[in-house]
Image (cartoon, rainbow, N blue to C red):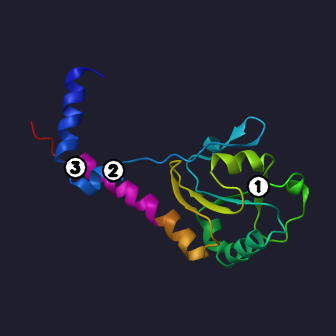
Amino acid sequence: MNKPALLLLAAALAVLPAGLAQAQVVRPAPDFAWAPGQTLRSWRGQPVVLVIAPSPLSKEFRAQSKKIERGYQQFAARKVIFVAAFTQAGAENGSLCTNVPFVIAPNGAEIACRYGTRVFSLNVIGRDGNLDLSSCKVESPWKIMDMIRNNAEQQASERKDLRLTPVIQ
């Protein structure tokens, strides 16, 4: 980027309201592979819900799966992808006691390390690859859906506002 363009960008950021400037901070979700040659980035454009748990039989995983089942039709309408990453060795080969079509990541312990957890974690990754929610507790389907819906709409709105903000020279 040339010097005049950098100065123009700096001037534009200086006149933005503080909240709007902070809204542009991106928190990229740590990438992971779910199959050979397939990574989280290959799902860009679709929301992803990543559930990290010790095993499919863990109390938290079963509780979160039941909550997701309650709102599954709304998730399906938004083309949400569900991924389960199990941290116990061999847990990915266990049977899931849920009707939610989870993609089972074969390297759950590695994914857990990337997301900074060892026990249970619910992570909502937006269409743009941002980590919109990371929670160590079981969440309601409505909170998950709000994160998916509102963050995408809010980000689009803020990008539109940035395009409309006049640059003062």
Residue 159 marker = 2
**Image coordinates for residue 63, horizontal then vertical, percent:** 73, 76
In primary-sequence order, the first of circles 3 and 1 is 1
Magenta extent? 150-164
* Badge 3: residue crowd in 10 Å (few <14, some 14–19, many ≥20): few
Residue 129 marker = none
* Badge 1: residue crowd in 10 Å (few <14, some 14–19, many ≥20): some
> Residue flagged by tag 1: what amino acid is it?
Val
Q: Which residue lies furthest to the bottom in this view?
A: 70
Q: Is residue 163 within the magenta segment? A: yes
**Image coordinates for residue 54, horizontal then vertical, percent:** 79, 60
Task: Label 3: state its secondary structure.
Answer: helix
Quadrant of the image for the C terminus? top left
> Residue flagged by tag 2: what amino acid is it?
Arg
Provide the residue designation for mark 3: 164
Q: Residue furthest top?
A: 2
**Image coordinates for residue 65, horizontal then vertical, percent:** 73, 71
The residue at 73%/45% (across/down) is 110
* Chief SS of the magenta region: helix
Residue nearest the observer in this picture, 3 or 45: 3
The residue at 60%/76% (across/down) is 140
The residue at 90%/60% (across/down) is 94
> Residue flagged by tag 3: what amino acid is it?
Leu
In primary-sequence order, the first of circles 1 and 2 is 1
Q: Distance of mark 2 from mark 3, alpha carbons? A: 9 Å
Q: In this view, does 69 lie to the left or right of 11?
A: right
Q: Residue furthest front?
A: 118
Provide the residue designation for mark 1: 103
Up-down relation of residue 78 to residue 87 (above or below): below
Q: Distance of mark 3 from mark 1, alpha carbons? A: 40 Å
